[in-house]
Amino acid sequence: MSKLKIVLVWQGISGRYGMWQDGLYAAMKRIEKEHTVRYIEPWEEVFPDEIVLFWEAACTYESKDGANYRRIQDLPNRKALLFAGGPIHPEWLDNFDHIFVEGEFNLKEMQELGVSTSIAFGVNEEIFYPRKEQKVFDGAMQATFAGWKRQPLFAEALGTRGVLCGRYQKEDTAPWEYSGDSIRLPELPAEAVARLLAASHTVVNTAEYWGGGQRCTLEAMACGIPVIVMNDSPKNIEYVAESGAGLVCECNYANIRQAVEQVKAWTDEEKARGVAYVQSKWTSKHYADNLLKWINS
């Protein structure tokens, strides 16, 4: 097969070079071995012979910057959306030839709407793997500070025994301001995040229904760290239920504390469930292969 030309459109990607090392990054590096790939902001030019991949959340569609995406969506190129969460807008999905989702929950939603869809997601297993680090924290969470991630709930439950790291948003300051009971760190390189997870007994993912958090959950599992997810986050419940590598708890500080103490007593065999689960279907190779099924079709 001759090389195809692929462009990944992601708002803010130009400011993330050196920090962007997640599963999508690793998957695209694999795809670069087979095809020509470039990475652009939504206002940059797309050429007629390129296959376009959009990394986009519903909040982008709804924001003032959404016009930049819609400009490209009007182009006649083959286009696929890497759906990153939020409310589903059927009229928005009509702009794409295919929708990639991060799990069975969203897959069923898309299938009910009659759109072409498949699962493509994973972690960068070259960075997120079991490490030997002294346990310093009872719980960690890696996520952008945002209302739908509920970092203040995390801080209320874990206090100084918990550590949060993620991108600070000037337009949404409350999650940072009201989570000061826990240690707060800015967005860190992936290698530093992996070491932070290894120094924690658990990852407590307080993301809510629209809050995503799937990457947070799978990266923790890949590191052999048990994950506690909230009972109003079906996309994360899916991973925990399928793997047995964590607990689901009610989203209040008392239940979170109880769950943390429970998983702190887990055996190495119980912690290894997450590693095996990620290796079975959520590595960057799985991610790349699932993207390529559509790209090469």
Image (cartoon, rainbow, N blue to C red):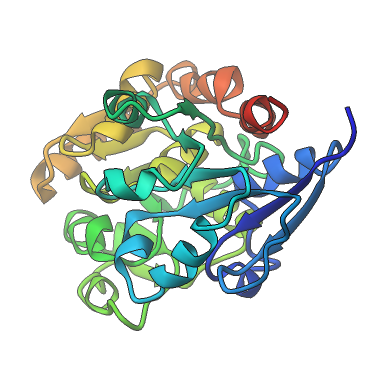
Closer-to-camera residue (166/270): 166
Q: Left of 61 or right of it: where is 190?
A: right
Asked if 8 appears above or below 240 in the picture, the reply is: below
Position of the C terminus by quadrant: top right
Residue lying furthest front in this view?
76
Residue 254 position, x and y percent, is 9, 45
Residue 124: x and y in percent read 64, 41
Q: Is residue 64 left or right of residue 17?
A: left
* Quarter of the rendering containing residue 286: top right
The residue at the point 90 percent across, 33 percent down is: 2
Quarter location, residue 281: top right
Q: How many numbered callouts?
A: 0
Quadrant holding the N terminus: top right
Left or right of 228? Residue 294 is right
- Residue at 12% x, 50% y: name it: 253
Residue occupying the point 13% across, 44% down: 251
Residue 131 locus on image (x, y percent): 63, 39
Percent of width and height locating residue 252: 10, 47
Vertical comparison of 37 with 160: above or below: above
**Residue 164 placement, left or right of 12:** left
Which residue occupies the foreground of this view, 54 or 195?
Answer: 54
Is 243 located above or below residue 215 in the figure? Answer: above
Looking at this rendering, what residue extends furthest in the right direction? 2
Q: Please tell me which residue lies in front, 20 or 37.
A: 37
The residue under the point 59% across, 59% down is: 9
In the rendered image, the vertical position of residue 202 relative to residue 155, given as above or below: above
Which residue lies most toward the bottom here?
170
Quadrant position of residue 107: top left
